Amino acid sequence: GQNIDQPTEMTATEGAIVQINCTYQTSGFNGLFWYQQHAGEAPTFLSYNVLDGLEEKGRFSSFLSRSKGYSYLLLKELQMKDSASYLCAVMDSNYQLIWGAGTKLIIKP
Amino acid sequence: DTAVSQTPKYLVTQMGNDKSIKCEQNLGHDTMYWYKQDSKKFLKIMFSYNNKELIINETVPNRFSPKSPDKAHLNLHINSLELGDSAVYFCASSSGQSYQPQHFGDGTRLSIL
């Protein structure tokens, strides 16, 4: 079966750095997405990785290792507004998006 | 504003009723989706339409019927609502290219009494 694992919840301090991991087992791979979802709101797109390596976009970076079935989202200089759920999603060989259950990130002052 | 818009935002109704949720996108996308997000926040695909044709129909009860009058609209009709249908339903759209992200509507919060 297809499976995406990410931690249920993480806590970090304002101004710090946090890394949210995602491991996946899917039938084929056509890219990995990270989305942010604030409580009561819609998911919004953060990043896309299809090749191995690090993609940097401001305070957020996303890393992919296809051989290990592994990705992480790195958030730097954490702000209170970064408190949200972060969803990892993988596009499989049928171009279907398989979603993880999300990681709830709590930022403390 | 270019966006995915869905109505209503909140829907409170009795068990056994029939209800519809509407979705429209003005992004020029070819593919539209319906997702269900339950209390555990797990996002589950229900349906996907590409140019008005159904391409994904996950195992959902046949009480749920999507209707796509044109590629900018994908409505969801639900018959004989049950308590377990209480959830947030999200509409989304994408260009259909694998590297392009999906854009989500604000969600419809469905509560069954």
Image (cartoon, coloured by chain):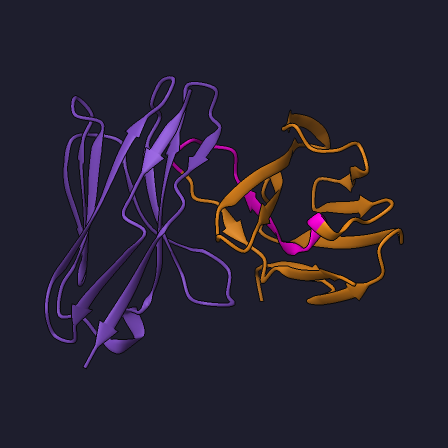
Of residues A87 and B32, the one nearer the viewer is A87
As drawn, B93 above or below A97: below
Residue B61 is situated, as x and y percent measured from the top left of the image, at 75, 33
In the figure, the shade used to draw chain A is purple
- Please state which of residues B49 and B51 is positioned toward the viewer in this rendering: B49
Q: Report x, y in % for residue B98.
A: 42, 31
Residue A31 in view, yes or no: yes
Q: Quadrant of the C terminus of chain B?
A: bottom right
In magenta, the rendered stretch is B84-99
| Quarter of the rendering occupied by the N terminus of chain B | bottom right
- Residue depicted at 70% across the width and 46% down the height: B72
Q: Is residue B30 visible?
A: no
Q: Residue at x 63, y 28 (%)?
A: B58
Say if A79 sits above or below B67 in the image: below
Q: Is residue B98 above or below residue A6?
A: above
Foreground pick, B67 / B59: B59
Q: Quadrant of residue A53?
A: top left
Task: Please tell me how many numbered marks the rendered image carries.
Answer: 0
Residue for point 48% across, 53% down: B41
Question: Which residue is outermost to the left?
Answer: A16
Q: Position of residue B11 (x, y in %)?
A: 75, 65
Q: Is residue A86 left or right of residue B93?
A: left
Residue A85 shown in magenta: no
Indicate left or right for B89 with A93 as reference.
right
Q: Is residue B88 magenta-colored?
A: yes
Instruction: Give the residue at the far bottom of this rendering.
Output: A109
For the point 68% across and 59% down, which residue is it? B6
Q: Colour of chain B?
A: orange
Q: Image quadrant of residue A86?
A: bottom left
B19 relative position to B23: left or right: right
**Of residues A88 and B16, which is closer to you in this image?**
B16
